[in-house]
Image (cartoon, rainbow, N blue to C red):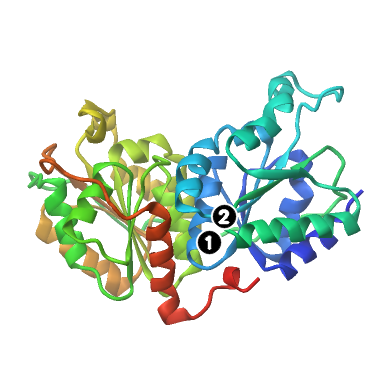
Amino acid sequence: MLSTKALGEELKNLGFTFYSGVPCSFLKSLINYAINELEYVAATNEGDAVAIASGAYLGGKKSVVLMQNSGLSNAVSPLVSLNHPFRIPILGFVSLRGEPRISDEPQHELMGTITMHMLELMKIEWEYLSDNIREAREQLHRANEAIHNQCSFFFVVKKGTLDNEILRNQSGTTSRNVEKRQKLHPDENPSRYEALTAIHAMRDEHTIQLATTGITGRELYQIEDAECNLYMVGSMGCVGSLGLGLAMSQPHKNIVVIDGDGSVLLRMGSLATNGYYHPANMLHILLDNHAHDSTGGQKTVSDNMDFINIAASCGYARSIHVHTLQELKEQILVWKTEKKLTFLYLPISRKSSEQIGRPIIKPYEVKERLRHYLQKNFGPFECDSD
């Protein structure tokens, strides 16, 4: 049986200090170690955990994700459409529930036979984690080399591999809404392009802008291709979690997350995680046109949603309905001045730019440019000093 503490210490020596995940009984000891000794973000689902860890990597942290193999299927979207095209490497530990000839619950039977095939199909290098510390150290160094080469690496963990690590008393954070403003008068309903132009005009040298996948990122690119911008090209619904990881790893930067109604609806659990950890340097802006604009304008179900109350109940300190572009600018300035986790909701029209193009810069080039931008003020990242 492998000493969890020895494994954790070796990971820490290699610079892996940021963890995110969803619990699994096979991995509980490593999760407990991360909670006890390091920085651990409890995600509401495995895809969000991958996005959170990826955001932390953008901000200079070597990141680890922990999940049950049933949750690997939940993480496929960000692994193939965020980590792969952006070349964002993360270290993963995935349990092997449903291992053939090992008694387990029936819902794990299929995943026990396809987990490794799934990793291979996603072009992720993997190994079974050894229960011998000498061999495990060698494995970790191989994994670390893969991370250094911008390739993700996963360990598949069998039942009984890790010894017991007692979870100490957890000091929960408290976050509550202190300001909530519902709709007060008719909305201006600007176009998305106009809203993005107003948001972009408010940036400064300390601002990083993350635009959700689809037309939002494409229009922001059209307004100005700035080195402080990241344009999501996939992993729909993950931009808020990416922003959380980046905000926590870069507390002195202003992280502006520009989201859409379809995106938020896809992974609403991320709002609870954001509110729980409540980074004051994160601004979450939802541009709601009640439609999936990038795919032909099909309606979303956001007509029925009260996003202001939802964000407030999740722990966003400020949750504000903004009616006009001028009010949007004013509220961005308030956030920059007062610094509290803030959610701004702006209804927009369904009008999009005509003949809008796609970024010609490749996703991994956007990532490298953004990391270089961050390094200008804060020096080399720990994940570059292998």
Q: Residue at x 21, y 28 (%)?
A: 296
Q: Crowdedness of circle 1 by 10 Å Cα count: few (<14), some, many (20+)?
A: many
- Residue 50, how many percent across, how many down? 54, 48
Query: 10 Å neighbourhood of mark 2: few (<14), some, or many (≥20)?
Result: many
> To which residue does mark 2 refer?
89
Query: Is 39 displayed left or right of 228 in the figure?
Result: right
| Count of all numbered marks drawn on residues in the image | 2
82 up-or-down from 6: above or below: above
Using the image as rendered, state which of residue 147 and residue 284 is in the foreground. Answer: 147
Residue type highlighted by circle 2 = Pro
Cβ atoms at labels 1 and 2 below 8 Å apart:
yes
Label 2's element? loop
State the quadrant of the C terminus. bottom right
> Would you say 256 lies left or right of 15 here?
left
Mark 1: secondary structure: helix
68 is higher (above) or lower (below) than 205: above
Q: Which one is in front, 319 or 4?
A: 4
